[in-house]
Image (cartoon, rainbow, N blue to C red):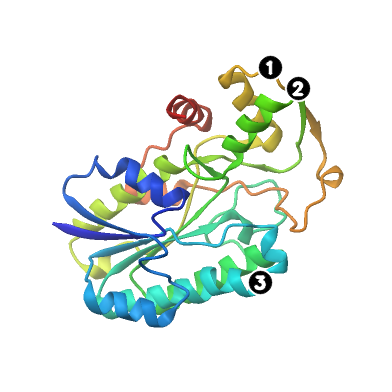
Amino acid sequence: MTKILVCGADGQMGQSFRAVSGNFPAFSFRFASRSDLDIADRSRVEAFFRLHAFDFCINCAAYTAVDRAEGDASAAFAINAEGATHLAEKTAEQGCALIHFSTDYVFHGGSGVPFREEDRTGPKGVYARSKLAGEKGVLAANPRTVLIRASWIYSEFGHNFVRTMLRLGAERDRLTVVCDQVGTPTYGPDLAEAVLRIIAMLESGPTDEALPYGIYHYSNEGVASWYDFARAIFEMAELPCSVLPIPTRDYPTPAERPPYSLLDKSKIKATFNLDIPYWRDSLKVCLTNI
């Protein structure tokens, strides 16, 4: 039976993997919270892997407080860069393949064409730079890494845009939401399901040299602004809160957000034969579960 470690099990993506794990009876899962495995602590990572062995490690542990990171760079880099690299080093020593998540924030600007994996990165802000540093660290440390950049992750778990909009929409009659930042919402359980299907394919690969490790992009299908996303949430949840579109300049934040972060998913779809749901369809599923 394939043994899979899921780090950061109490976070949004960790809980998303828990939610879909029952669909994969051939896999044996170990869900490790930060109290079980703090990836920022090299000695604890080493001690953990002395006791346990896995075929795959899925790293859901991350510092995701984008604005807070601007004043807390050491913590962001400790988890997103140094911690991720610790994990990659130990999994490599064990011959364990690594699934690592990064973000659309490693890009900034763009020409209106979805970003491909090989496009030049240009992170702005501490969070974005820490995630790019983590990408470089894990790819250098473990050649058996599948690195997935995802965008605008939400779910019925943890803190995210959907849950925040539902709370605010129940409290207020009107909200303003930025309309000039464009990307695609990604439903956490959809991403988790895709990753486990990727692992199933990697397990069936003929030789290690033929297995498709490297960088991939994933989000749900379609395009939206944060304004579009908020409108859809209130429409589907039947909340009477009205939404007014505003430009980014009218909603300043400590960290600068990418104005355009649409990801080209053709590589991951072709390589792993994935069918990716449309973002509005997945939003309906999420709201039903909530």
Q: Are marks 2 and 1 in contact (CB under 8 Å)?
A: yes
Residue position marked by numbered label 3 in the rendering = 73
Query: Spatial distance from mark 2 to mark 1, Cα to Cα?
Result: 7 Å
* Residue plotted at (23% across, 69% down): 208
Answer with mark 3 or mark 1, whichever residue precedes in sequence.
Answer: 3
* Residue plotted at (57% across, 66% down): 131
Quarter of the picture containing the N terminus is bottom left
Q: Are marks 3 and 2 in contact (CB under 8 Å)?
A: no
For the residue carrying disc 1, how many other residues have a C-alpha within 10 Å: few (<14), some (14-19), or many (20+)?
few
Which amino acid, by three-letter code, is at mark 2? Asp
Residue position marked by numbered label 1 in the rendering = 240
Residue 123 appears anywhere in the view: no
Residue position marked by numbered label 2 in the rendering = 173
Answer with mark 2 or mark 1, whichever residue precedes in sequence.
Answer: 2
Query: Spatial distance from mark 3 to mark 2, Cα to Cα?
Result: 37 Å
Vertical comparison of 284 with 267: above or below: above
* Residue plotted at (34% across, 41% down): 19
- Residue 27, x across and y down, in percent: 20, 52
Which amino acid, by three-letter code, is at mark 3? Ala
Q: Quadrant of residue 205?
A: bottom left
Q: Residue furthest left?
A: 1
Which amino acid, by three-letter code, is at mark 1? Pro
- Residue 154, x across and y down, in percent: 52, 41
Element type at marker 1?
A: loop
For the residue carrying disc 2, how many other residues have a C-alpha within 10 Å: few (<14), some (14-19), or many (20+)?
few
Is residue 239 or residue 101 the one in the foreground?
Answer: 239
